Image (cartoon, helix red, strand yellow):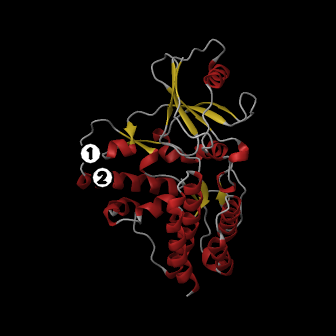
């Protein structure tokens, strides 16, 4: 079998699996006579190890392998299991999602969770989008707004990660997330003082957070990097959505998609289909807590990716958020 791993430093967070392990995984999933033509690791993701595996059939399959349990942070624990629990709730966009062909959380083959999915048609979002001039990206953002709206229309049984732990109130879920983020930053030997200050303010603002009473489905990572676009279409056309492992139940305004759509004015087409964001005093204050939580997670991810030079930006932004919260 031809094997093409991504070359990384020995101490990198993502650790590739061996050709023998991929062979064992595929034989458990598809039978002992399964032969692999090639396995090519895809380098766009930053958490799981992802491979395009050619089994000599009409279409390759996608193998995703989670990090070893000991390498997972609290806010990213067992994400693959969370995705598996989430899939039935993605029915409104089910036609866009890959199909799960095999899944194994036993750790009997390798000491990591893994799943095998169908490979979606099209080209990855970042590659496909840059093939069009920026003035034609508006249609992409309008489609993304529709998808986000459809996802957020789904209601759930509790607040917090889809797989759990679940919380009765939105404030409890937010406080638990902020506490876990701070603890993860401590483990990484990064300063988490500002995140803890945000958590203290949130504890005093429970009433504002608990104006959100109905848990709605949040994708957690819906943006350019996790969609597929049609090949050679007249305008950017989304055909697939993947990597639904950071899903949770909560306030749609807290979703990563909303954060990114709000960051730049050239993305205003998103709101044409999604709907205008709420500007009530409560929504405005909650948005500060959501921003703080995103910044804490960004700080942790940059550290994990070996980009500490970018960390100071999160401290400055979080300082500005705290100033507004404590004013």
- Residue closest to the far bottom: 327
Q: Quadrant of residue 234?
A: top left
Q: Estimate the spatial distance between the alpha carbons at disc 1 and disc 2, rounded to whole Å.
A: 7 Å
Q: Viewed as shown, does residue 168 lie left or right of 140?
A: right
Asked whether residue 19 appears in the rendered view, the answer is yes
Q: Quadrant of residue 263?
A: bottom left
Residue 15 placed where, x, y %? 62, 38
Could you tell me which secondary element the residue under label 1 belongs to? loop
Q: What residue did someone put label 2 on?
A: 139
> Which quarter of the rendering shows the C terminus?
bottom right
Q: Camera-side residue: 174 or 280?
A: 174
The residue drawn where x is 58% and y is 45% is 47
Q: Are marks 1 and 2 in contact (CB under 8 Å)?
A: yes
Q: Is residue 95 above or below residue 187?
A: above
Residue 208 placed where, x, y %? 60, 78
Asked whether residue 153 appears in the rendered view, the answer is no
Residue 198 placed where, x, y %? 63, 75
Residue 80 placed where, x, y %? 63, 43
Q: Is residue 36 above or below residue 245?
A: above
Q: Camera-side residue: 259 or 282?
A: 259
Q: Is residue 51 above or below residue 76?
A: above
Pick whichever of labels 1 and 2 is earlier in the sequence: 2
The residue drawn where x is 71% and y is 54% is 164
Q: Camera-side residue: 118 or 72?
A: 72
> Which quarter of the rendering shows the N terminus?
top right
The residue drawn where x is 51% and y is 60% is 309
Q: What residue did someone put label 1 on?
A: 235
């Amino acid at each position: 079998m031809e094997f093409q791993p991504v070359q990384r430093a020995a101490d990198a967070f993502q650790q590739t699996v061996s050709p023998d392990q991929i062979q064992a995984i595929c034989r458990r999933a598809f039978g002992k006579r399964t032969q692999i033509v090639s396995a090519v690791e895809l380098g766009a993701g930053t958490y799981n190890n992802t491979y395009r595996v050619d089994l000599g059939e009409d279409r390759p399959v996608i193998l995703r392998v989670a990090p070893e349990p000991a390498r997972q942070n609290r806010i990213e624990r067992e994400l693959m299991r969370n995705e598996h629990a989430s899939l039935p709730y993605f029915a409104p966009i089910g036609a866009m999602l890959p199909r799960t062909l095999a899944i194994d959380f036993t750790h009997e083959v390798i000491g990591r969770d893994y799943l095998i999915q169908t490979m979606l048609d099209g080209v990855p979002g970042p590659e496909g989008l840059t093939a069009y001039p920026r003035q034609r990206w508006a249609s992409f953002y309008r489609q993304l707004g529709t998808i986000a709206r459809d996802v957020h229309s789904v209601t759930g049984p509790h607040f917090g990660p889809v797989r759990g732990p679940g919380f009765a109130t939105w404030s409890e879920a937010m406080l638990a997330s902020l506490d876990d983020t701070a603890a993860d930053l401590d483990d990484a030997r990064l300063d988490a003082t500002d995140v803890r200050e945000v958590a203290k303010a949130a504890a005093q603002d429970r009433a504002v957070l608990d104006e959100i009473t109905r848990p709605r489905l949040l994708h957690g990572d819906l943006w350019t990097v996790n969609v597929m676009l049609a090949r050679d279409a007249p305008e950017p056309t989304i055909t697939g959505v993947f990597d639904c492992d950071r899903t949770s139940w909560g306030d749609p305004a807290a979703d990563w998609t909303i954060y990114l759509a709000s960051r730049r004015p050239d993305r205003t087409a998103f709101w044409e289909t999604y709907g205008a964001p709420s500007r009530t005093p409560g929504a405005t204050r909650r948005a500060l807590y959501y921003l703080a939580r995103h910044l804490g997670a960004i700080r942790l991810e940059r550290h994990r990716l070996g980009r500490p030079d970018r960390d100071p930006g999160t401290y400055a932004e979080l300082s500005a958020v705290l100033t507004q919260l404590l004013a």
